[in-house]
Image (tube, rainbow, N blue to C red):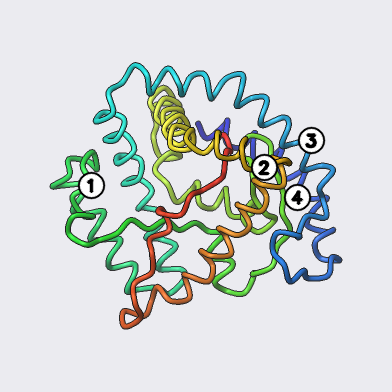
Amino acid sequence: MVKLFRLVVMIGLVIFSVCVNAEETTAPVTVVNQQDPYESFNRVMYKFNDFLDRAIVKPVTRVYITVLPKPITKSVSNFFSNLNNIPTIINDVLQGNFYQETSDTWRLGINTTIGILGLFDVASHMGLESNSEDFGLTLAHWGYNNSNYLVLPFFGPSTIRDGLGIPVTYYMSVYPYIDNDKISYGLYGVGVVDKRSQLLDYDNVMQQAAIDRYAFMRNAYMQRRNYLIQRNKELNNPYLEKNVPAEKFSEQNLSLT
């Protein structure tokens, strides 16, 4: 699992070596969904990812949701959401959001124990809403706010900042610490299918609403990330009115991971 991830990261580093230098000389753009100086490259990567999605990921996902009953797929989603609490908690701490870190830690503990390894989302019924953090958001918290849009092969929509955060977030997760490759690959693969299954409903929306699917996805991704960055500024203040959980915003991100 680690070897495969390192190979993908090496591909990403080749891209970053070109794009990071370009970003340093690019003037900040005030409208987030116009930060796309690499559009020619991004459109090529978008078509590549879209081909893989249509040829492999989407068909497998349709079989997955057809064969398995909804209660099972819901439990699988809960399980992976619970695993995601681990890097989320680490990034809460790195951002200094200790109030949110306490909530997310309680959520992990309750769902892992009472919720049977996260198969059942007991914590949400207790008022502990789901939260998701990654190292890209941590970089933004400490000042790396504006970053150009970048479509990564296999990973899909991202930015220079968020792309740099991918390997860091990965090593905060459980995957690199699973010794058995079969279990590691299998778990990661099911996670990809589970994530894709949650986005199937948005396919028709995008096809009907978007003349340019690439631009639609770019704008949706950049707007969502901008929302999360602004939201995180308030997460550490328990006296502010609780925001709508991030997961309730539709994520128009059809990446393969």
Q: Which residue is mark 4?
A: 16
Q: Is residue 242 above or below residue 67?
A: below
| N-terminal label among 4 and 2 | 4
| SS at badge 3 | helix
Give coordinates of residue 157: x percent, y percent: 64, 46
- Looking at the picture, tell me which residue is in the foreground, 17 or 138: 138
Residue drawn at point x = 36 percent, y = 52 percent: 86
Task: Point out the frontmost of discs 2 and 1.
Answer: 2
Task: Point out the frontmost of discs 4 and 2.
Answer: 2
Q: Residues within 10 Å of mark 4 (few under 14, many from 20)?
A: some
Q: Residues within 10 Å of mark 1 (few under 14, many from 20)?
A: many
- What amino acid is labelled 3 in the image? Val
- What amino acid is labelled 2 in the image? Ala
| SS at badge 4 | helix
- What amino acid is labelled 1 in the image? Asp
Numbered label attached to residue 44: 3
Residue drawn at point x = 46 percent, y = 54 percent: 249
Q: Quadrant of residue 24?
A: bottom right
Residue furthest to the bottom in view is: 239
